[in-house]
Amino acid sequence: MGDSIGSRVEGTDVKKRPFSVAILGAGAAGLCTAIKLREAGIEDFTIFEKAASVGGTWRDNTYPGSGCDVPSMLYSYSFEPKPDWSRKFAPQPEIVEYFETVARKYRLLPNIRFNTEIVEARFDEEEGLWRIRSAAGEEFTANVLISGVGQLNRPANPKIEGLSDFKGIAFHSARWNHDVDLAGKRVGVIGNGASAIQFVPEIAPVAGKLTIFQRTPNWCVPKPDRPFREWEKKLYRSFPILARIQRWWTWLTLERNYLAFVQGSFFGKLFEKAALKEMETHIKDPELRKKLTPDYPAGCKRILLTNDWYPALARPNVEVETSHIARVTADAIVTEDGVSHPVDVIIYATGFESTDFLAPMKVVGRDNADLNDVWARGAEAHRGVAVAGFPNFFMLYGPNTNLGHNSIIFMIECQANYIVQCVSALRNSKLRYLDVRKEAMDSFNRDLQQDMQKTVWAAGCSSWYKTADGKVTNNWSSFTAKYWWQMRHPDFAEYALKGA
């Protein structure tokens, strides 16, 4: 397990005391961590979930057409494969059902406090405890605090003059209003990212007029999706080894795609060529093609997989508006060219507050350090999971662990295994706390950002991968195999260890 911790512990007054773990979020990360804790013999854990059910972002994003852009076989835990996915790329309801099934099978529901939003956590250095407070004012303590809230949980609402004056109906795609009948309505969609390319084709046939307010065009490539045949499902159920081989073949295929994100790469040009061919197949209007052609390298912003986005944009009732929005009135969206676009419904397809990570939750570590202040110039962590000055605190899907080419479930499992080894060391060695050394964290991030400069994510476009200042805080800078290798075991020489 890396460097031995026995000779590195400061303090020798070891006391026996209860050991508990608090996990924030009952999505893919939180559930995985809980399962791994139980496997390690750690039973005293509580998952705090702000909603009434499990599933995280997949529970929240119920918009029409919602689904995954990672192949189903790889968008599941390696230890809990699902041989009977309905499609190559699973739809949202099936993904939520998968996580619900996992929570029941691994007996996690009794350990989850639903409808409990944590708003503050403070580390008590003397006691080696995290003191946690909920939105309802409840107070809890735990030796270890683990965040599984991820990067895509707080919708980013646009800041546009006059939004409060709008008399129609407005909502974010991540909080879809299913009570609104869009039939015959004039609908304005602000944004054209990963959610829009899924729900726009679903609502375009029923809307009277659909106007998409595009800030930047996307690189879109065909999605190799289809239903699984019954004989395929039966084969995977009867011979689990085949499903496992398929999973790892899918991982290997996607892993190769990282090469497309190296600046100036041949694979990147292939993605661009495929995207342009797809556009030319469906978009015959040269002016519309011009609007939809990106002026940045493929991958700088998220590459989108879709088969029906371009056909939807070619419909006679759909318009793509590229002039920036100036303001909103009681019944229209006015663009900077002075044109007023009448709308009955506005849908925000504006993504998430991805670079703020744990905000607005307040996390306070040693010496009264506020994590939001520490991250004022852009979030960073050691291997994406630990922050110097915040002992016994770990994250999954933290800074620089998002992917553009493979499955985040793979990354989450790497992180959960690493974190559980740290937690086990804390408990078994009866430590008060374990705190990553700043020099180790800084060295890791220097190397990471240096590698990042070789990728298209560091190119000139704006994206949810980076801060307003241009620092890439969300993406991992290399192959997932490299991350797995680094996360196999903690090196406790990188941590300051304090005895009880």
Image (cartoon, rainbow, N blue to C red):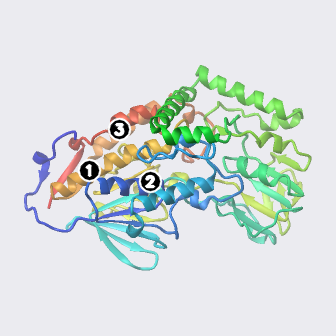
**Residue at numbered disc 2:** 29
- Tell me, yes or no, whether the two marked residues, 1 and 3, touch with CB atoms within 8 Å: no
Q: Is residue 390 visible?
A: no
The C terminus lies in quadrant: bottom left
Residue 1 image point, x, y percent: 22, 41
- Tell me, yes or no, whether the two marked residues, 1 and 2, touch with CB atoms within 8 Å: no
**Residue at numbered disc 3:** 444
Q: CA distance from mark 1 to mark 2?
A: 16 Å
190 vs 53: above or below:
above
Q: Nearer the viewer, mark 3 or mark 2?
A: 2
* Labelled disc at residue 37: none
- In this rendered view, identify the residue nearer to me: 491 or 454: 491
**Residue at numbered disc 1:** 422
Q: Is residue 349 left or right of residue 434?
A: right
Residue 208 image point, x, y percent: 90, 58
Kind of residue indicated by mark 3: Phe
Kind of residue indicated by mark 1: Cys
Kind of residue indicated by mark 2: Ala
Q: Secondary structure at mark 3?
A: helix
383 vs 358: above or below:
above
**Badge 2, how many Cα within 10 Å: few under 14, some, many 20+?**
many
**Badge 3, how many Cα within 10 Å: few under 14, some, many 20+?**
some
